[in-house]
Image (spheres, rainbow, N blue to C red):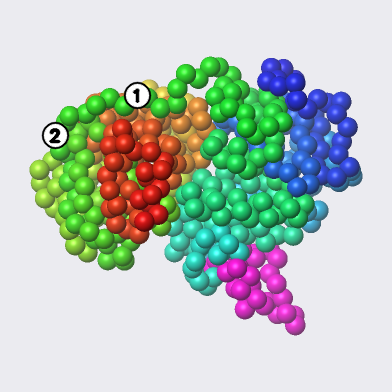
Amino acid sequence: MTDVASPDATTPGTPILREGLSIRGIAKQYGPVPVLRGVDLDVRPGEVVALLGENGAGKSTVSSIIAGLVQPSAGTMTWNGRPYAPTSPADALSQGIGLIHQEMRLLPELSIAENVFVGHLPTRHGRVDRAGMARRATEQLRRLGLDVSADTLVRDLRVAAQQQVEIAKALTLDARLLILDEPTAALGGEETDRLFAQIARFKQAGLGFIYISHRLDEIARIADRILVLRDGQLVGAFESAQTPVKTLVETMVGRPLDRMFPPIVPSQGPEALRVEGLTSPSGAFTDVSFSVRAGEVFGIAGIVGAGRTELVRAIAGADPIQSGHIVAEGRQFVPRSPADGLKAGIVLVPEDRKLQGLVLEHSIGDNIALGNYARVAPGSFVRPGAVRRFAQDGIRRFGIKGRAGQPCKHLSGGNQQKVVLAKSIARQPRIVILDEPTRGIDVGARAQIYDVITDLARNGLAVIVVSSDLDEVLGLSHRVMVLSRGRNRGILDHTEASRVAVMERATH
């Protein structure tokens, strides 16, 4: 093991734990390609170990091996002092180890309660105890801040609510070690606080946690120790979670990092978009008005459930509008469909890139060409050469690490997001809306996405950014509008916008 950032790093000679999890020399290869190289890791009962690293560093592979999804190529594991080699997730769970996946594994046609208890349905007198199942699911969901009926179908929930169901599902398992892979990626501050309260309660009961997150501000709040992976190797181990963020980031990326957010350059462009009295028929937002200038990054902040996503989807024509109107480039209209938004020069990069932004089985080239066939299919015939050349322009412009013919499902989250951006910007819009642009993306890729967003504004586009990461909104935006309960609670200039100022309005 090389380049260990701290003398506290675990070494192969460290004795295994008699209680808790110990892994020694774990390695994994896919053909000739090494993914993990001799990783050592310990988790004691009642502690949270943060596992950090960029996408592709090996975090998910380590988690998958511990949870029985993947078999290691070398190395050993012990669990409570006994050899541990799970052959499946069910095998791991039977021994007390569970995993919350970064990518949600819910069944959309089943209810919340059925998803929470799938695989371990409670029974009474030989039958499924549906009343007890609904009651227990509701209790856990309310602890996490989700106040909806346990009979609600998962398909009818927003992404943040689905994430809370995924968390509730894991917390109801009879586990002694839980692996949480990006559990707060879709959550806001209040929901994250509730999750952390639950983790603290389980810690007191002796549960151990492996916590994987790209939100480094969370680590100091929840973790006891920090391990950092890079290129499949353990490169840093820190016995204190109060390690400076700059130190963690530089350990993760292997180089000095001077800044995270690009400087905010003043914008004096003309008005590109004006929203007047927009109201949703569902009550998600009411009488919302604001404007955005060309060359401006306009942030929208608020806790989960404030109506942020519903608002921008309505502006783009994806959700209905009950009253109010939009003025884009001087033309007043009410969008009835995404096609109306596109005609007005408005594109939306949705919050769920996998389900709403990409066709994962298709190539990078095909995905970039989607919605741009007028450019690559003159005469209604798609020309592979034209698709390839068109895609290569997007790949080069947005720094996508991949080839035009490579399936999108094989890309990292950051590169998938760049493909969605390339596809959207290829339409030559004048107004770009980005909903959760860095959800589930590592810190290195985040900085690249931030540069892209800033460049879009510098090239004269009006950019709207919605994010549950308040630091992201504050670090990128010229102005920030705060939504609470579907209403505009104020618009702050970046010189006056702060966490306190935003949260005071967000909790109004």
Q: Amino acid at mark 1?
A: Pro
Question: Hey, which residue is sitting farthest bottom in the picture?
Answer: 125
Front residue of 406/141: it is 141
Residue 19 in the figure: left or right of residue 251 = right
What's drawn in magenta, residue-wise?
110-139
Residue 40 in the figure: left or right of residue 63 = right
Residue at point 15% right, 38% down? 271
Secondary element at tag 2? loop
Residue at point 41% right, 57% down? 305
Residue 176 in the figure: left or right of residue 465 = right
Residue at point 73% right, 79% down? 124
Q: Amino acid at mark 2?
A: Pro
**Residue 414, x across and y down, in percent:** 47, 33
Which of marks 2 and 1 precedes in the sequence?
1
Q: Is residue 508 above or below residue 53?
A: below
**Residue at numbered disc 1:** 263
Front residue of 284/369: it is 284
Q: CA distance from mark 1 to mark 2?
A: 21 Å
Front residue of 269/69: it is 269
